[in-house]
Amino acid sequence: MISGSLSSFFVMYKTIQGSFFLTFFTDQCCFKMATSTSTPTHPPVRISLIAGRYLVFDIDAVMVLRRSFGLCGVLTGTMPQNPTQNLFLSMPQELRAEEARLVVDRGAGYVADEAGDHLRLLKEMSSGVGEKRREGYLRELREKKVAAKRLFDEEKEAVRRMHEGKRGKGKKVQKVEEGGGGGGDSLFETATAVQPAPKEALPAITPSTSNAMLDPAGTSGAIADENLPEPSAFYRELNKRGYFTTPGLRFGGGYSVYPSDPFKFHAHYLSSCYGWDEKIPMLDIVTSGRLGTAVKKSFMFGAEREEEEGGKKRGEGEVRMFCVEWAGM
Amino acid sequence: MTTLNQRTSALTTIVLNNLQHQHDWTALHPHTQPNLPRTLLYGLPPKRLYVHPDEQVEIIRAEKEMGNGGGRIPQEAELEWVLPLHLSEKWSPAQFAAVFDALDARPPRSREITKEEEERSPWLAYKGSRRGKRVLLATVQDDSTVTYYWMHDGLVKPRQN
């Protein structure tokens, strides 16, 4: 039920945020290495854990992750009307478990148990504590309505002007204008008419999405660190060195590793992560090396060194990496 | 029954013969060391086998500065490490790490590159102080096929093939 209402939310989100999204794509994303977990200049990134997937729904958060943390994730949102159109996917962004863990470890955000948190917020809404939140939600609804109306009006106005330009100042145009001013607009309230707050007597609204109920600076529903996925030292090391990673299936590896933002560079490596003492068949190394060379990349594999005596925790040890490429003989 | 030692030495012999007779390598020597799991080889390929992409950039820059209409800087071959392996083997990252930790980047008898030479022609540093650790994996199959793949220690960007 929750995921269903979320998907309807994506569509709405897309129409409203569409223009922002385009600027995000054309913008040169310069990746600044945020080396320390110093005081963040952005609200904590909310990663929603839904059905075992780590999703980010906020476009600003996606930009923060990409620019300052070298995380590009995978955009997964599609249009319910045309689900096979998958070349240009949109929000939400899905992160791998180790990426979600990295965001938390670097103090940039938190992972929220979305289903549980949503129900908790709903319950609170009917009690006194949630009254403010309810008002916030209604305000957000109203703002969205005004924004949608403005967009609609602008579009209508543009169409009208286009027709006016084509036909000149004939009688017909005047008729259209009269019709537009009378019948057309009466279907919608004007922007000013929407502004006054709804009467208290209105029936309560059940929010189908959580984001309007949330305090952007809060960490509602955050999952405790010990219940988060294991950190991956191999991935953390790549991220620390400024590499971006995407799922590697399209080049035949575990990850595709880019020297910087994938918008600007081709992948340098296709890579896999092994255990320190995991036995790798030679044929795997040879075939991956061969494949890597065929796609002008090098096959890189790595492992976290396991300390013999106590030493460091898992996910914090030294990482060794090796690159394999065809020798040309 | 053959011992493990005998089998790996047979492997070394196959690779040595293959390099010498099929690939025209010279100056081939076996190399043993107490902290190495098996005998490695080092030798001189007939022409240079590996040029780091950054070195290539330096060479092209030097050739441009030289002028004289597309003149090339002659590339001398350098000694390379070879690790003989059988296709049926399975090695862990720990084992590869141990091999790299035990080896010098430059095999014994490699030509010394002096500081002055490196300053005069920066690309020479990739044969000297800036040479990374790399080993040629020579993987043998029972039909005597030997395939050769480079393995570099650490992140080394791919060549522009």
Image (spheres, coloured by chain):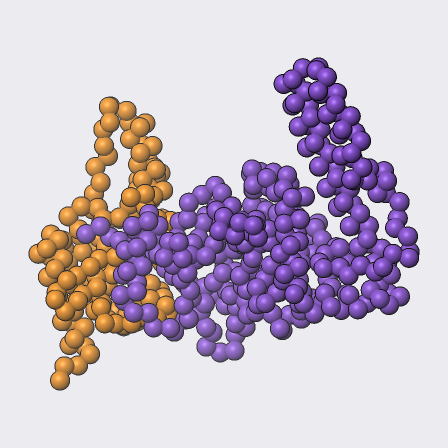
Q: Is residue A103 above or below residue A123?
A: above
Where is residue A144? Give x, y as percent.
Answer: 75, 46
Residue occupying the point 60% across, 70% down? A228
Q: On the picture, is B18 further left or further right than A228?
A: left
Where is residue A315? Give x, y as percent.
Answer: 52, 68
The quarter of the displayed image where residue A24 is located? top right
Q: Is residue A131 above or below residue A149?
A: below
Where is residue A8? Give x, y as percent.
Answer: 64, 54
The chain letter corresponding to purple is A
Q: Visible in this render: residue A26?
A: yes
Q: Visible in this render: residue A57?
A: no
The chain letter corresponding to orange is B
Q: On the picture, is A229 further left or further right than A147?
A: left
Residue occupying the point 75% across, 39% down? A149
The quarter of the displayed image where residue A188 is located? top right
Most foreground residue, A140 or A169? A169
Q: Is residue A299 above or below residue B7?
A: above
Residue occupying the point 26% across, 48% down? B50
